[in-house]
Amino acid sequence: MHRVSIRLFLAALALAAATAPVSARSLRVVQASGTLGVCAHPNSLPYASRTATPPGFQIELGKALAERMHLGMQPDWVLTGIQIPRADCDVMLDVIADPEAQGETHMKLSKPYYRNGMALVVPKGSKITGFDSLDGTTKVGVAVGSIPAMVLNQKGVAISIFGFEEEMIDAVATGEVAGAVVTPIFAGWYLKTHPNLNLVLLPVDTAEPRFHWNVAVGMRKPDADFAAAVDAAMASLTADGTVARIYASYGVTLPPLQ
Protein backbone atom coordinates (compact mmCIF):
# COMPACT_ATOMS: atom_id res chain seq x y z
CA MET A 1 0.00 0.00 0.00
CA HIS A 2 1.30 3.43 -0.91
CA ARG A 3 1.23 5.18 2.44
CA VAL A 4 0.23 8.68 1.41
CA SER A 5 -1.26 10.97 4.01
CA ILE A 6 -4.53 12.16 2.51
CA ARG A 7 -4.68 15.05 4.97
CA LEU A 8 -1.29 16.28 3.78
CA PHE A 9 -2.43 15.79 0.21
CA LEU A 10 -5.56 17.87 0.77
CA ALA A 11 -3.50 20.53 2.50
CA ALA A 12 -1.20 20.62 -0.53
CA LEU A 13 -4.20 21.04 -2.81
CA ALA A 14 -5.38 23.94 -0.67
CA LEU A 15 -1.94 25.55 -0.75
CA ALA A 16 -1.78 25.31 -4.52
CA ALA A 17 -5.20 26.87 -4.89
CA ALA A 18 -4.19 29.69 -2.60
CA THR A 19 -0.83 30.51 -4.15
CA ALA A 20 -1.23 29.85 -7.87
CA PRO A 21 -3.52 31.40 -10.46
CA VAL A 22 -6.08 29.03 -11.91
CA SER A 23 -8.17 29.29 -15.02
CA ALA A 24 -11.65 28.19 -14.06
CA ARG A 25 -14.21 27.04 -16.61
CA SER A 26 -17.78 28.29 -16.70
CA LEU A 27 -20.68 25.84 -16.84
CA ARG A 28 -21.16 26.70 -20.51
CA VAL A 29 -17.53 25.88 -21.31
CA VAL A 30 -17.65 22.64 -19.29
CA GLN A 31 -20.85 21.56 -21.04
CA ALA A 32 -19.33 22.37 -24.43
CA SER A 33 -16.31 20.20 -23.59
CA GLY A 34 -18.56 17.33 -22.54
CA THR A 35 -16.35 16.34 -19.59
CA LEU A 36 -15.94 17.16 -15.92
CA GLY A 37 -12.33 17.16 -14.75
CA VAL A 38 -11.74 15.63 -11.31
CA CYS A 39 -8.37 15.99 -9.59
CA ALA A 40 -7.28 12.88 -7.68
CA HIS A 41 -4.14 11.14 -6.46
CA PRO A 42 -3.27 8.09 -8.60
CA ASN A 43 -2.36 5.80 -5.68
CA SER A 44 -4.26 6.56 -2.49
CA LEU A 45 -7.02 4.03 -1.92
CA PRO A 46 -9.71 4.19 -0.73
CA TYR A 47 -9.79 7.73 -2.15
CA ALA A 48 -8.57 7.07 -5.67
CA SER A 49 -6.34 4.86 -7.78
CA ARG A 50 -5.29 4.98 -11.40
CA THR A 51 -4.83 1.22 -11.75
CA ALA A 52 -6.64 -0.60 -8.91
CA THR A 53 -10.05 -2.24 -8.91
CA PRO A 54 -12.11 -0.82 -7.33
CA PRO A 55 -10.78 2.60 -8.35
CA GLY A 56 -11.63 4.52 -5.17
CA PHE A 57 -14.71 6.40 -4.03
CA GLN A 58 -13.52 9.74 -5.45
CA ILE A 59 -13.39 8.23 -8.93
CA GLU A 60 -16.76 6.52 -8.56
CA LEU A 61 -18.40 9.61 -7.08
CA GLY A 62 -16.74 11.81 -9.71
CA LYS A 63 -18.28 9.64 -12.44
CA ALA A 64 -21.69 9.77 -10.75
CA LEU A 65 -21.46 13.55 -10.37
CA ALA A 66 -20.48 13.97 -14.01
CA GLU A 67 -23.29 11.70 -15.19
CA ARG A 68 -25.84 13.61 -13.11
CA MET A 69 -24.58 16.77 -14.84
CA HIS A 70 -24.90 14.99 -18.24
CA LEU A 71 -21.15 14.94 -18.70
CA GLY A 72 -18.34 12.44 -18.97
CA MET A 73 -15.67 12.33 -16.27
CA GLN A 74 -11.96 12.91 -16.86
CA PRO A 75 -9.61 12.19 -13.95
CA ASP A 76 -6.62 14.51 -13.64
CA TRP A 77 -3.91 12.62 -11.74
CA VAL A 78 -1.87 14.79 -9.41
CA LEU A 79 0.78 13.70 -6.93
CA THR A 80 1.31 17.02 -5.20
CA GLY A 81 -0.47 20.32 -4.85
CA ILE A 82 1.99 22.15 -7.09
CA GLN A 83 0.63 20.13 -10.03
CA ILE A 84 -2.88 21.51 -9.63
CA PRO A 85 -2.31 24.71 -11.64
CA ARG A 86 -1.18 22.58 -14.62
CA ALA A 87 -4.12 20.19 -14.33
CA ASP A 88 -7.43 20.65 -16.10
CA CYS A 89 -9.67 19.57 -13.25
CA ASP A 90 -12.82 21.47 -12.40
CA VAL A 91 -13.48 19.92 -8.99
CA MET A 92 -11.84 18.19 -6.06
CA LEU A 93 -13.82 15.83 -3.86
CA ASP A 94 -13.66 15.31 -0.08
CA VAL A 95 -12.59 18.89 0.63
CA ILE A 96 -12.90 20.08 4.22
CA ALA A 97 -15.76 22.60 4.27
CA ASP A 98 -14.20 25.04 6.68
CA PRO A 99 -15.04 28.75 6.22
CA GLU A 100 -11.52 29.81 7.18
CA ALA A 101 -9.96 27.30 4.81
CA GLN A 102 -12.33 28.49 2.10
CA GLY A 103 -11.06 32.01 2.56
CA GLU A 104 -7.43 30.92 2.36
CA THR A 105 -7.76 28.61 -0.64
CA HIS A 106 -10.16 30.80 -2.64
CA MET A 107 -12.04 27.66 -3.61
CA LYS A 108 -15.78 27.75 -3.92
CA LEU A 109 -17.34 25.00 -1.84
CA SER A 110 -20.48 23.09 -2.64
CA LYS A 111 -23.02 22.45 0.04
CA PRO A 112 -21.60 19.75 2.38
CA TYR A 113 -22.51 16.20 1.49
CA TYR A 114 -21.18 14.32 4.53
CA ARG A 115 -19.44 14.77 7.84
CA ASN A 116 -16.00 13.39 8.60
CA GLY A 117 -13.99 13.43 11.78
CA MET A 118 -11.96 11.46 14.27
CA ALA A 119 -13.08 8.14 15.73
CA LEU A 120 -11.62 5.33 17.80
CA VAL A 121 -10.67 1.86 16.63
CA VAL A 122 -10.70 -0.62 19.52
CA PRO A 123 -10.72 -4.41 19.93
CA LYS A 124 -14.14 -6.03 19.88
CA GLY A 125 -15.40 -6.25 23.45
CA SER A 126 -13.23 -3.36 24.62
CA LYS A 127 -14.33 -1.35 27.66
CA ILE A 128 -13.54 1.82 25.71
CA THR A 129 -16.85 3.21 24.50
CA GLY A 130 -15.72 6.62 23.27
CA PHE A 131 -13.33 9.48 23.86
CA ASP A 132 -14.98 10.32 27.19
CA SER A 133 -13.99 6.89 28.54
CA LEU A 134 -10.27 7.46 27.96
CA ASP A 135 -8.01 8.26 30.90
CA GLY A 136 -4.41 8.02 32.00
CA THR A 137 -4.55 4.24 32.13
CA THR A 138 -5.48 3.74 28.48
CA LYS A 139 -2.71 4.19 25.94
CA VAL A 140 -4.09 5.40 22.63
CA GLY A 141 -2.40 5.71 19.25
CA VAL A 142 -2.50 9.16 17.65
CA ALA A 143 -1.01 10.70 14.51
CA VAL A 144 2.14 12.75 14.93
CA GLY A 145 1.43 16.48 15.14
CA SER A 146 -2.35 15.98 15.09
CA ILE A 147 -5.02 17.88 17.00
CA PRO A 148 -6.15 14.68 18.80
CA ALA A 149 -2.58 14.17 20.01
CA MET A 150 -2.59 17.65 21.54
CA VAL A 151 -6.10 17.46 22.99
CA LEU A 152 -5.75 14.00 24.53
CA ASN A 153 -2.31 14.81 25.94
CA GLN A 154 -3.73 17.92 27.59
CA LYS A 155 -6.48 15.78 29.12
CA GLY A 156 -3.96 13.39 30.64
CA VAL A 157 -4.67 10.49 28.30
CA ALA A 158 -1.64 8.29 27.64
CA ILE A 159 -0.79 8.51 23.96
CA SER A 160 1.59 6.77 21.56
CA ILE A 161 2.70 8.60 18.41
CA PHE A 162 2.49 7.04 14.94
CA GLY A 163 3.14 8.25 11.42
CA PHE A 164 0.37 6.40 9.57
CA GLU A 165 -3.14 5.26 10.36
CA GLU A 166 -2.53 1.66 9.29
CA GLU A 167 0.34 1.44 11.77
CA MET A 168 -1.97 2.61 14.55
CA ILE A 169 -4.68 0.12 13.65
CA ASP A 170 -2.17 -2.73 13.52
CA ALA A 171 -0.88 -1.64 16.94
CA VAL A 172 -4.41 -1.99 18.34
CA ALA A 173 -4.65 -5.47 16.84
CA THR A 174 -1.39 -6.57 18.48
CA GLY A 175 -2.28 -5.03 21.85
CA GLU A 176 0.47 -2.42 21.73
CA VAL A 177 -2.20 0.24 22.34
CA ALA A 178 -5.74 -0.03 23.66
CA GLY A 179 -7.19 2.06 20.84
CA ALA A 180 -6.30 4.40 18.00
CA VAL A 181 -7.65 7.76 16.87
CA VAL A 182 -8.36 7.47 13.16
CA THR A 183 -10.51 8.87 10.39
CA PRO A 184 -13.51 6.62 9.69
CA ILE A 185 -12.88 6.99 5.96
CA PHE A 186 -9.51 5.23 6.05
CA ALA A 187 -10.31 2.97 9.00
CA GLY A 188 -13.51 1.68 7.42
CA TRP A 189 -11.60 0.67 4.30
CA TYR A 190 -8.71 -0.83 6.23
CA LEU A 191 -10.98 -2.95 8.40
CA LYS A 192 -12.93 -4.08 5.33
CA THR A 193 -9.73 -5.25 3.67
CA HIS A 194 -8.33 -6.77 6.89
CA PRO A 195 -11.34 -8.60 8.39
CA ASN A 196 -9.13 -10.86 10.50
CA LEU A 197 -8.10 -7.99 12.80
CA ASN A 198 -11.17 -8.43 15.04
CA LEU A 199 -11.48 -4.70 15.63
CA VAL A 200 -14.43 -2.32 15.69
CA LEU A 201 -14.73 1.33 14.68
CA LEU A 202 -16.60 3.53 17.15
CA PRO A 203 -18.69 6.53 16.01
CA VAL A 204 -17.13 9.91 15.24
CA ASP A 205 -16.68 12.02 18.35
CA THR A 206 -19.11 14.96 18.21
CA ALA A 207 -18.45 16.34 21.71
CA GLU A 208 -15.13 17.92 20.72
CA PRO A 209 -15.67 20.48 17.90
CA ARG A 210 -12.11 20.04 16.64
CA PHE A 211 -12.70 16.34 16.06
CA HIS A 212 -15.30 16.62 13.28
CA TRP A 213 -15.94 18.65 10.14
CA ASN A 214 -18.19 18.82 7.09
CA VAL A 215 -16.96 17.76 3.66
CA ALA A 216 -17.85 19.35 0.32
CA VAL A 217 -16.90 19.50 -3.33
CA GLY A 218 -14.15 22.04 -3.94
CA MET A 219 -14.57 24.02 -7.18
CA ARG A 220 -11.84 26.10 -8.77
CA LYS A 221 -13.41 29.56 -8.95
CA PRO A 222 -16.55 28.48 -10.80
CA ASP A 223 -19.20 30.76 -12.16
CA ALA A 224 -22.57 30.83 -10.39
CA ASP A 225 -24.19 28.46 -12.89
CA PHE A 226 -21.48 25.82 -12.47
CA ALA A 227 -21.68 26.01 -8.66
CA ALA A 228 -25.46 25.69 -8.77
CA ALA A 229 -25.23 22.69 -11.11
CA VAL A 230 -22.78 20.91 -8.79
CA ASP A 231 -24.98 21.61 -5.76
CA ALA A 232 -28.06 20.29 -7.55
CA ALA A 233 -26.27 17.16 -8.73
CA MET A 234 -24.80 16.41 -5.30
CA ALA A 235 -28.18 16.95 -3.63
CA SER A 236 -29.73 14.46 -6.05
CA LEU A 237 -26.95 11.91 -5.50
CA THR A 238 -27.34 12.25 -1.74
CA ALA A 239 -31.13 12.03 -1.80
CA ASP A 240 -31.26 8.84 -3.85
CA GLY A 241 -28.58 7.14 -1.73
CA THR A 242 -25.86 7.07 -4.39
CA VAL A 243 -23.28 8.83 -2.22
CA ALA A 244 -23.89 6.54 0.76
CA ARG A 245 -23.78 3.41 -1.45
CA ILE A 246 -20.47 4.37 -3.04
CA TYR A 247 -18.77 4.97 0.29
CA ALA A 248 -20.38 1.88 1.86
CA SER A 249 -18.80 -0.29 -0.84
CA TYR A 250 -15.44 0.79 0.63
CA GLY A 251 -16.47 -0.08 4.18
CA VAL A 252 -17.35 3.51 5.07
CA THR A 253 -20.53 4.53 6.87
CA LEU A 254 -20.85 8.28 6.45
CA PRO A 255 -21.65 10.20 9.63
CA PRO A 256 -24.71 12.45 9.13
CA LEU A 257 -24.36 16.17 8.64
CA GLN A 258 -24.95 18.36 11.68
Image: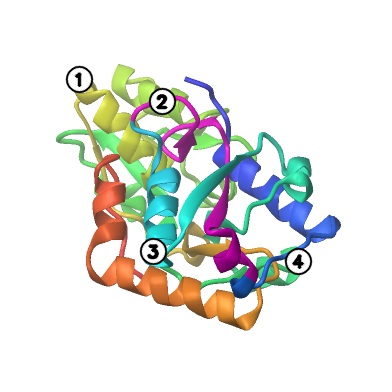
- Relative depth, front residue between 122 and 80: 80
Residue contact between numbered discs 3 and 2, judged by CB atoms under 8 Å: no
For badge 2, the amino acid type reads Ala
**Mark toward the viewer: 1 or 4:** 4
Q: Is mark 1 on a helix, strand or loop?
A: helix
Circle 3 residue: 114
Circle 1 residue: 196
Gap between marks 3 and 4 measured at Cα? 22 Å
Gap between marks 3 and 2 measured at Cα? 25 Å
Residue 174 position in % (x across, y down): 32, 17
- Relative depth, front residue between 221 and 194: 221
Question: Who's the residue at 57% across and 81% down the image?
Answer: 225
238 to 52, vertically: above or below: below
Residue contact between numbered discs 4 and 2, judged by CB atoms under 8 Å: no
Question: Who's the residue at 72% across and 65% down the image?
Answer: 24
Q: Which of marks 1 and 4 is nearer the N terminus?
A: 4
For badge 3, the amino acid type reads Tyr
Residue 195 position in % (x across, y down): 21, 25
Circle 4 residue: 104
Look at the image and give the residue range highlighted in magenta: 29-53
Question: Who's the residue at 48% across and 51% down the image?
Answer: 73
For badge 1, the amino acid type reads Asn
Gap between marks 1 and 4 measured at Cα? 43 Å
Based on the picture, tell me whether residue 162 belongs to the magenta stretch.
Answer: no
Residue 109 position in % (x across, y down): 58, 70
**Mark toward the viewer: 1 or 2:** 2
Q: Is mark 3 on a helix, strand or loop?
A: strand
Circle 2 residue: 52
